[in-house]
Image: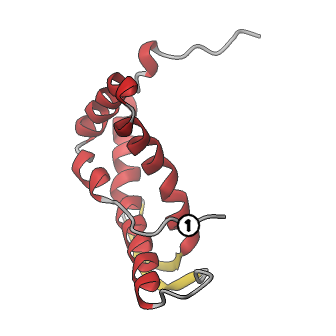
Amino acid sequence: GSAAKFLPDDEVPETLDPLFRALFDEQWPFLQLACAAVDEHAAAHPDAARTPRAFGYAPFVAGGVTGERRLLAYSAWRAQRPLDEYWGLALAPSRELELRRVDAWLARLGVRDAFRALQPAVRLER
């Protein structure tokens, strides 16, 4: 078989922008709610040893259809990964070029400010 080839500089093709924009537009508001629920719970229960699995229900959109689903701590935990990667770039001067590329891509999608605005106060561990 032939070896998979990456695009130069790990560039994301513009043809994928609508897909990533839709994913962000639909999922990011829910992830913001999940992170806020974890932060609110931690503030209200500072001595709690564990975070609940769920915080009730919250609205979501998928494919233009709206509904409600359980607001899970797991969703907030999963949101930490891209945020950790991003802020890791921002904290490492040697990775400034990578950060500029990511910022340019997020700006191209029109989501840079919303992405950077999500800064959970609580770090969930597995």
Residue 2 rendering spot, x and y as whole percentages: 71, 9
Residue at the farthest top position: 2
- Binning the other alpha carbons within 10 Å of mark 1 as few (below 14), some (14 to 19) or many (20 upward) gives some
Residue 81 rendering spot, x and y as whole percentages: 52, 50
* Among the 4 quarters of the image, the one containing residue 73: bottom right
Residue 13 visible in the displayed image: no
Residue 104 visible in the displayed image: yes
**Residue at 34% across, 65% down:** 29
State how the image is colored.
Answer: secondary structure
Q: Amino acid at mark 1?
A: Leu
**Residue at 45% across, 85% down:** 41
In the depicted view, which residue is nearer to us: 56 or 124?
A: 124
Tally the marks. Answer: 1
Residue position for label 1: 124
Q: Where's the C terminus, which quadrant?
A: bottom right
Residue 1 rendering spot, x and y as whole percentages: 77, 10
